Structure formats: C-alpha cells, structure tokens
Image (cartoon, grey):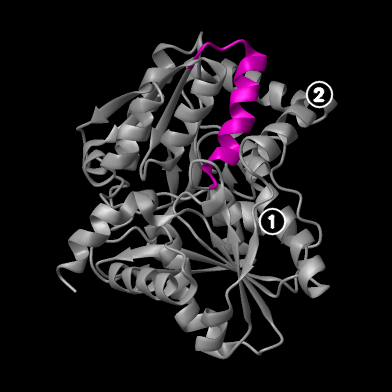
Amino acid sequence: MSEYRYPDARGKFGVFGGKYAPETLIAALDEFENAYREAREDPTFLADLAELQRDYNGRPTPLTFAKRLTERYGGGKIYLKREDLCHTGAHKLNNALGQILLARKLGKTRIIAETGAGQHGVATATVCAKFGMECVVYMGELDVERQSLNVFRMEMLGAEVRRVTSGNKTLKDATNEAIRDWVTNVGDTHYIIGSVVGPHPYPTVVRDFQAVIGRETREQLLRAEKRGPDRLVACVGGGSNAIGLFHPFVEDDAVKMYGVEAAGRGIDTDDHCATLTKGEVGVFQGMKTYLLQNDDGQVNEVYSISAGLDYPGVGPEHSAFKDLGRAEYFAIDDKAALDAIYRTSELEGILPALETAHALAFLETLAPKTDPEEIIVVCCSGRGDKDLNTIVKEARNR
C-alpha cells in the first residue's frame, strides 16, 4: 500500500467510485471539482478553514487514554479520538465547514443536505446560520421520530427540515430526495453531502476534510507515546469518520485498520446494514461500490438501531480497502452496541453515540487479543445525547 494514490483522474478507487450522475449535474460536479482543486492549493482558503476549525469547531479534539477500558481487557492501550467534543457533537462539522467555504467560492446561495442521525443536518444548519445561507435538510420520517432532538436543533438554527415518507423513510430515501432537489435547483444550490459517498469528487472532498482526525491522532500519539498507533477502529455507515481516521495512515502497512458496520437484529437476518460484510458490487447514488441488493439488483431496505449507520451502501474507498485487504470490516448487532454504551459510560464517563458504540463494542473481540505494548485508537465519532430517547426506550426491554 506504499503507492496508494487513489482516486485516479476519473474519481475511481480501483473499480469503485466514479461519476454516475444525471447529465444535469455533470457541469455542477465538474465546477465543484475544479473549485476544490484550486482551494486546496489556496493559502487564503486553507487559512480560513484552519481558523474556523480552531476557533469555531474547537479543534484539535483531545485524544483520551481510556484507562479503565484498557484495564478491563488487559491488552493494548486504548485511546479515544474525541470527535464527540467537536462543536455540534460529532465529526460532521469538519466537512460542513470546508464545503460551505467551497459553496461561497462557487457563488451558491442555497444549501441542501441529507441526514440520518441528524448530526450532519445539524452541522449543515450550523454553517448556514453562521454564513447566512438558506438551508434545506432532507430526513426520513423514521429518523425524524427517533432523532427528534436533532430535528428541533436544526429548526432552531433556521433550517427547513423536509420529512421524507418514501421507501424505508431513512437515510437512503432522504438522499434520493436531496438529489432530486439538486437536479431541479442546480443553478443556485450546493449539495453538502455528509459522508464519503456519492459521485466524484464527493468521496475525495469529504475524505480530505475529515482527514484532520487522523493527522491530529498521529501528532497527539507522538507526544503521548513517542510513536504511532498499531490498530485503528471506527464505525462505518457511509464511512466518513473511519476514512478520516484511516487515511493519514493508509501507506503505513504496520497500522491495522478495522471498520465496524451495523449487524442490526443479526447478520443472518434481513434486518441489518452490514454492506461490506454481506453486500455485492453495484451502482448506487452516483458511485460504484458494495451494496445490499437483491437478485434483481434492487437496493434492499436495511435496518439498524443507529440512524447514522442505516444505509445500504458504503463509500467507494472503503470498498477498495476491502478488496485490497487494507482494512478489515466486521459487524456488531444492536444488543452489543447498547451494551457498549453502558460499558463506556460506566467505565470512562463518556456517553457515546449509537454509531460510535458499534466501534466500541468491537473492542470486546479485538482488545483481549492485543499485547499490552500495542496502541489501539477508536474514533469516538459523536456523543450520545441525541440517542437518549432510543436508549431509554431500549432500556425498558433490557
């Protein structure tokens, strides 16, 4: 992997990725790509983004040694990269800040977004409020119900939340509606996609804005331990927090990377969204990637207790990592994720999001197999305040 140079000029990560989009959007995607290429070489743009990340988002986020979790497993040292301490409560603002600056550079006046767990919607509404731009967020009706606090937050920030009642009423359906809106209003509208998914250049743009997670992790570990990590762990729905942690280490073959998907009610049931574990290659929402689909190529309805992981596809770079063997992917069910929330809260005083809890649950499998001198970093992608309604409801059944 020392020569990892993806994506190529076509936006492909090997056979994955690409730009499968309606003709109406091709010019907008090309314009977006050109603006990003210019911006990443522009000292003024980079300085503006760095200032926002520092003074508005609160970066760098801490790297917390999880002493009691480490003692529980008796293996390697466990560190938590605390994206839950970002402004708005999750890693999503890293990307939203970058994209709102690009939208302004493009002269767009209206912003749309999709959201599942609500954190990307809140992040988008936040940057739109800060820069005085119109904001419309699409959210599945089921997710509106289980993430009502985040819906209220978005509306307080001035966003219009459009409830999506088609399909499974979750993230996939919200994304479909956002794409339809963009096709209709492409002249004045920028679509802030929240994960490393969609047509090129989105998987690359979002990855690069989220790679601050891994860069800080490297610097912080060098100060704390005088060396880098041995193992990286992150939850994967679309996969933005995982790519953000993984990407700065991708050429270091000694660093092992683990992505953790949602097994829902069980990996052998129809109620899961373990795309890389059970999926097959197909084209979906602008990209070629692994998908959960039936024999006719129709995308399956999926399920997870976690709204942010409830997605039938995955970022194309993760698909490439799977086929290259650069990262390993595992699936954790609802019960194990809920157990991890209680365990992390009780041992470390940190209430993680349901998404993060899947990564923390994987420590039950991974950590006991590691040696005490090893270093494990888990991306704490978001905080669990938003999930309290779901957690309380599930607690009655424990």
Magenta-drawn stretch, dominant element (helix, strand or loop): helix
State the image quarter where residue 318 is shown.
Answer: bottom right
- Residue 53 visible (yes or no): yes
- Residue 18 visible (yes or no): no
Mark 2 Cα within 10 Å, few/some/many (few <14, many 20+)? Answer: few
Of the residues shown, which amino acid type is indicated by label 2?
Answer: Thr
Image point (34%, 41%), residue name: 171
Q: Is residue 109 magenta?
A: yes
Whether 328 is drawn above or below 6: the answer is below
Find disc 1 in the rendering and name its residue.
214
Question: Percent from the top left, x then y, of residue 112?
Answer: 44, 23
- Quadrant location of the N terminus in the rendered image: bottom right
* Mark 2 residue element: helix
Of the residues shown, which amino acid type is indicated by label 1?
Answer: Gly
* Mark 1 residue element: helix
- Quadrant location of the C terminus in the rendered image: bottom left
Find disc 2 in the rendering and name its residue.
44
Q: Is residue 285 magenta?
A: no
Whether 164 is drawn above or below 243: the answer is above
Q: Nearer the viewer, residue 397 or 368?
A: 397
State the image quarter where residue 183 is shown.
Answer: top left
Give, as a single range, the part of the protein colored magenta: 91-110
Q: Nearer the viewer, residue 306 or 1?
A: 306
Question: Percent from the top left, x then y, of residue 295?
Answer: 28, 54
Closer to the N terminus: mark 1 or mark 2? 2
Question: Percent from the top left, x then y, of residue 36?
Answer: 70, 27
Mark 1 Cα within 10 Å, few/some/many (few <14, many 20+)? Answer: many
Q: Is residue 256 left or right of residue 259?
A: right
Q: Give the numbered dot on residue 46.
A: none
